[in-house]
Amino acid sequence: MPMYQPSSRREVDSQVLDLETAVKDGVLGGGGGGGGGGGCGVVATGFGSEKLDLKLMIEELEPMDVPMVFICPISLEPMHDPVTLCTGQTYERSNILKWFSLGHCTCPTTMQELWDDSMTPNKTLQQLIHSWFSQKYLAMKKRSEDVQGRVKEILENLKKIKGQARVQALKELRQVVQVHGTAKKTVVENGGIGLISSLLGPFTTHAVGCEVIGVLVNLNLDLNSMSDLLQPAKISLMVDILNEGSVETKINCTRLIGMLIEGTDFASQNVASLSLLVGLLRLVKDKKHPNGVVAGLNLLKTICSHEPVRNSFVNVGAVPQLVELIPGLNNECLELVLHILELLSSTPEGRLALKDCPSTIPNVVKLLMKASENCTQLALSILWSICKFAPEECASLAVDAGLAAKLLLVIQSGCNPVLKQRSAELLKLCSLNYTTTIFISKCKLTRTIQ
């Protein structure tokens, strides 16, 4: 259960919260709920019968808005054993005892001096807290049972139905597993992954494929399931769907393929096809959908970490397209793009493509000391690769783009020694074509040095 932050506090006028007043004031949420006698809204699991464990309930329940009077002002967590001080303020017993052990003789909320150091157990509030969480917990359990039953029913139906009925069943299953952890567990425990994966085949329609992928990407796949999905025919179908589907489907395909190839040697599985690389490039260029950009760049980074793929990626025109993306990206995406470009710069074809793209040097130089230190490190590595590759051509372009002044800033900054050393080496490389006077003058370094 995360920390709770109530927007305001309810003042308690007496040492023990009055049950009837609390119910009338809506402490239990949703108003009074009349009901005579039987405990003023306290459920059957209250103190008169076997109780549910409060700590367990709080841990298992999803984060929710909790009545303010249930929250300890010290820890901002629901109270288990509330006690009330002479000031009328109520705290979790362990928290107020810790406060006193630190030498305080005041009420933490009001900062009043305590004229009486006694603590009154607030049994009424304790019962209200337990009652409220019990109701929420039992309702959650009931929903979970309903979800489990519905998931099992859908899985059974998928064995028999076809056509549009199958699409609708998969769509409902996708929506359920996106929301309920119980649904995911039920699918796995009832052999649902194998059943759903079997629906991906040579005759799978686009509609069915989209929904199957939407379900699978939300599940925890075991090694056998991932091995089955890595079959060339199934990967080929996923790539086709990625290229033809909606934005949501493209993102789901990208994430699923990423899940399947993470930590594996996928080269032999024909995962990194040209069609996939082209589809991912289209996805990352669609800045209207940031989630797609991040997902696409993450998968491209994983794919490009395998050296045999890099030349193929360069050959589909990836370098200029990625370079043109740089100015409009946030730091997370910048690091991903720079990481990919650095990987591509490790090949002669990649360095040539970077050199031939007119935006490479100005766009990358601007990133030095502008974004994160990681971005600066990656940018330096890329600039070093292309300036070393074609020093006479690229070094002068870099100097004109303001590289020398940026490198001096890196050297003078608190960056790590490796960055400073690389900056010094690159600065020396850039200065080879100039006399010292011309270099300082051309780069306008006087102001930077001062």
Image (spheres, grey):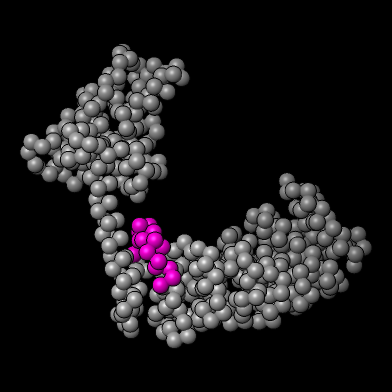
User: In the drawing, does residue 264 fall left or right of residue 445?
Assistant: left
Outermost residue, right side: 435
Residue 116 point in image, percent of width and height: 30, 13
Residue 119 point in image, percent of width and height: 30, 19
User: In the drawing, does residue 142 fall left or right of residue 243?
Assistant: left
Total labels drawn: 0
Outermost residue, left side: 36
Q: Which residues are magenta?
A: 176-195
Residue 440: say if magenta: no
Q: Residue at x 17, y 29 (%)?
A: 18
Q: Nearer the viewer, residue 444 or 218?
A: 218
Q: Is residue 48 visible?
A: yes
Q: Residue at x 82, y 60 (%)?
A: 426
Residue 247 point in image, percent of width and height: 45, 75
Residue 180: say if magenta: yes
Q: Is residue 272 visible?
A: no
Name the quadrant of the N terminus.
top left
- Considering the whole magenta stretch, tell me its main secondary structure: helix
Q: Residue at x 33, y 14 (%)?
A: 117
Is residue 325 placed above or below 32 in the rendered structure?
below
Q: Nearer the viewer, residue 355 or 349?
A: 349
Q: Residue 31 appears in which quarter of the rendering?
A: top left
